[in-house]
Structure formats: C-alpha cells, structure tokens
Image (cartoon, grey):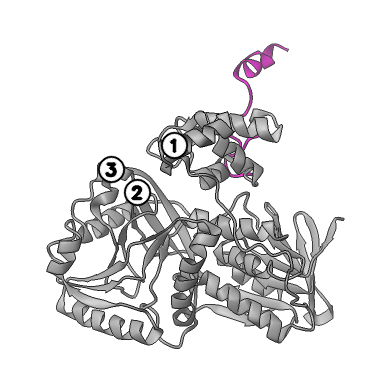
Amino acid sequence: MIQRLFDVIIIGAGIVGAALARELSAYAMRVAVLDKAAEIPSGASRANSAMIHAGYDDKPGTQKARFCPSGNRRFHELQGPLDFTLRECGSYVCAFEEDEIRHLDALLDQGKRNGVPGMEIISGDTLRDREPHASREIRAALWAPSGAIVNNFEAVLAFMDNAQQNGVELFLETQVTGLLCSEEKQEVFGVETTKGRFLAPVVINAAGVHAGEISRMAGEESVRIRPTRGEYFITDKTVGHLVKGFFFACPSAKGKGITVASTAEHNLLIGPTSTPQTDLEDTSTTMKGLEEVLDGARKLVPDIPSGAVITSFAGVRANTLSGDFNIAVLRKPRGFVNVAGIKSPGFTSAPAIALHVVEMLREELADRVIMTPNPHFVPERTHIPRFAELSMEEREALVRRDPRFAQIVCRCETVTEAQVVEAIRRGARTVAAVKIWTRAGAGRCQGGFCGPRVADILARELGIPLEEVTRHGGHSRLLVGRTKEYWFRGNE
C-alpha cells in the first residue's frame, strides 16, 4: 500500500482549501491537498455568484461578519500578486416597498458595525442615473462600493498555483474514505484514500458540502450540512452591458435572493434559486427553477432577453444548522481541524479564514506542527496570457515567441493553441479543466467548435489515445471508439 508523509493534509481544493494551502506554503512544511474531483475548482467554489461581498449582510459578532469584510480586503490585496481577474463594480440592494426601505436602514447600520466602508442609501432615481436599465419600480437602494466581481475559476487556480509553486502537492481524483486515528480517536495521524494512505499529524477538513461526512469520521457529529441547490443562467456578452454593478433584491428567509450582475468577462449572470435537498451532489437544473430565475432577475432589470442565454448551471451550498461558519480545532482527535459550513459569503471570506486557521495552528497545535518561515517562498505568480484581452502589438510579440499563439482554437473566446498547451503543462487533464484555465468552450457555442480540437490537443500533449480523454475525469469519456473499427468489429 502506498503511504505518503506530510506535515499537514487539507481535504478539499475549493477556495478555502486553496487559500489555506497558499498561506501554509509560506512555511517550511510538507502540505498535501486532496480532492476527489478531476479538476479545480469543483463544487460550490465553481458554481456560485462570483461576488466579492462587501460584508453588510451578516449579523455582527458572527464568524461571517468577522471574515467577510477582511476577506474582501484580502482579495483586493492579492489580485495583483496572484494575477486573477477582479472587477470593481460595487453592489446595490434594491427596495421596492416601504418595509424593504426600512430593511436597507438595518443593513446600513449592520454594515457600519462590521466595518464596511463607503456605504449609503440612494434613491431609485439616483440608481437609474447610474444604471439606466434598472427597474422603474425600485424606490431606493443600498450602495456598497467595495463589492466586486471576481473570476472565481481564476481565483481558485491562482491560490493553488502559487501554493504549488511553493511546494504544496495537489492530489486530484483522490477521495478520502476514512481517518487514521489512534485508539479511541485520541489523535489523528492521517487519512485513508482511494489512492492509498496519506500520513500527517494535522488534518484540516475543508470538504465543502461533504464536510459533515469527514467530521463524522473524526467522531464529531455537530457539523450537519443541509444543502440547498441554486440555479443560474449565463447570457452571452451582447447583454453584459445591461448592468455595471451587482444587483440584489432585499434578502429574505431564503437568503440573498435572485441577483443580476455582469461577470468578470462581461457576460450577464442571473440567479440563484434556493431549493432545499438531501442529495449533496444534485446540481441539476429545472424548468421551474430557471423560470424563477428569469422572473426574479427581470424584476430588477426588465430588459433581460431570454434569447441571450447560452447556458445554465446549479451549485449546492453547504448550509449549517447555526447558519454560521464552523471553524474549530477539535480537542479529540487531536490534530483534526474543521473548516466547515463555508457558504455565502464563504468565497469572499476564504482568504481571511485561511489566515485565521494558520494562527490557530500556531497557537493550538504547536506541538504537532512547526511553523518555520519558508526561506524560498515566492508570493506572486502569473496567469496564462489572456490572448483575447491583449493589443495587436502584444499578440504579435507572443506569436513571435511561440507560433502556437497564432492558432485560434476557441473562436468565441479567442483562445489559442499555446494557451491550451500551457494549461495542460500547469496540470489540466480534462476538457473541463482546459475550459477553467483558458475559457475555451465558455463562449456562445459552449464548446461546439473547440471541444474536439481541445480533446485532440489533450491526447497529443498527455500522450494518451483520444478515446481516453475525459470531460470531468472518471468515466466521462467523450468517445467510445473509432467509427470504422466499431463497424467492422462484428465481422471478425
């Protein structure tokens, strides 16, 4: 049986696991990140609103209120060094009725107590001066200038890419099947996985919607995940101009409600719904849910055309019974840390949570892990060149350096062969991973043109038959065999 030895194991390579891995890579220690998916991000870090929340929506004194505003600041600080796309846009909470206007006052007070800068309540007319497509029915709005839109794919990759540059090891398609503990679960000393044993004196549970299952392996029953599914639409870029800021309706018992926002790449994102379910993996979309999304979005921005929709998707959120994050070092088994229930504003909060967990290790688990600074730590990295965003002079310079930059693979997003090859060099092993790294397949045709070409490049660069290329790893192969071989097989 394969056994690998580390100082810290992180279960889950979502935004929390990736941000934590990056922070731990600043120390001279061996860190492993395990994820059962074939590419990152997966789960809620992949399917969400991509909002960097300002931090006014959470009750003062909660962990959400503590980490959201500081996470917002941390995202702004790291955008440059880690080279991910973050667009300053601000956010509006829109009120249609008198009681909703009173709720804006409460949110404003809450935001000030949470330390959110620059907030104000504006009239509906002022909103429409800034945002001409906003509904005529909106009477007032809470404006928070520190709200932002992030490319959530790029952000997760950036944290993990930098962590790997600094020595962290990432193991994909590696599912944790059990914890390795001493008798009566006094101490943890590793995990059992589908790829063998990983040994470490500290195990951190950042498994998203599966955090409850991992916690129960440690004997801690308090983490109960109550998943809700949120459905979304994405439109093409022809209507991305309809809004500049991030639009929310007034929050309700079901959460922040249907939102409308222009993405970091200037598509329009609308959604989500909030459907309670028991299945942790059910990310299906429904006609009823998508109708709810469109109706809710048009209440805020009536001009949204249904003909501009290019795809739909759903994500599952890791709700807890308390409604707050569950971040704690367990007394038993010693060495086990829960970072669970990280639902909205979890993506925003992740970089601040990572700093907090590092301090917890330093203060509460100093007997199990030594926090010596990494003398070779490099705090920055660069993304693959974004060919579509470059000037003609910059494109010509890239083509002179590598002629594969002149070969357009994805026409919708202007992605070149050189970008696809670089994504594979950095770890992409599936068609979906190439899309995450480069946006090949993210445009209006959704991979109808570039999908076969991307698969061909994956096969060539990985040295595998085309039939073994997968969309998401596992059994998700794109091809079952060559047509004529299959046709003549019956004659043999």
The mark that comes first in sequence, 3 or 1, is: 3
Q: Please say if 146 is above or below 154.
A: below
Amino acid type at mark 1: Glu
Label 2 residue SS? loop
Q: Nearer the viewer, residue 141 or 234?
A: 141
For this view, does 401 lie left or right of residue 228?
Answer: right
Q: Nearer the viewer, residue 351 or 283?
A: 351
Residue at position x 15%, y 68% in the image: 126
Q: Point out which mark residue 233 bears.
A: none
Amino acid type at mark 3: Thr
Q: Please say if 99 is above or below 416.
A: below
Residue that mark 1 sits on: 393
Residue 220: name its quadrant.
Answer: bottom right
Q: Please say if 248 is above or below 83.
A: below
Magenta region, residue range: 468-492
Q: Main secondary structure of the magenta part?
A: loop
Q: Nearer the viewer, residue 20 or 222?
A: 20
Residue that mark 2 sits on: 267
Residue 483: name its quadrant.
Answer: top right
Q: Nearer the viewer, residue 189 or 151?
A: 151
Q: CA distance from mark 2 to mark 1?
A: 26 Å
Label 1 residue SS? helix
Pointers 3 and 1 in contact (C-beta within 8 Å): no
Residue 329: name its quadrant.
Answer: bottom right
Residue 354 visible in this rendered orientation of the protein:
yes
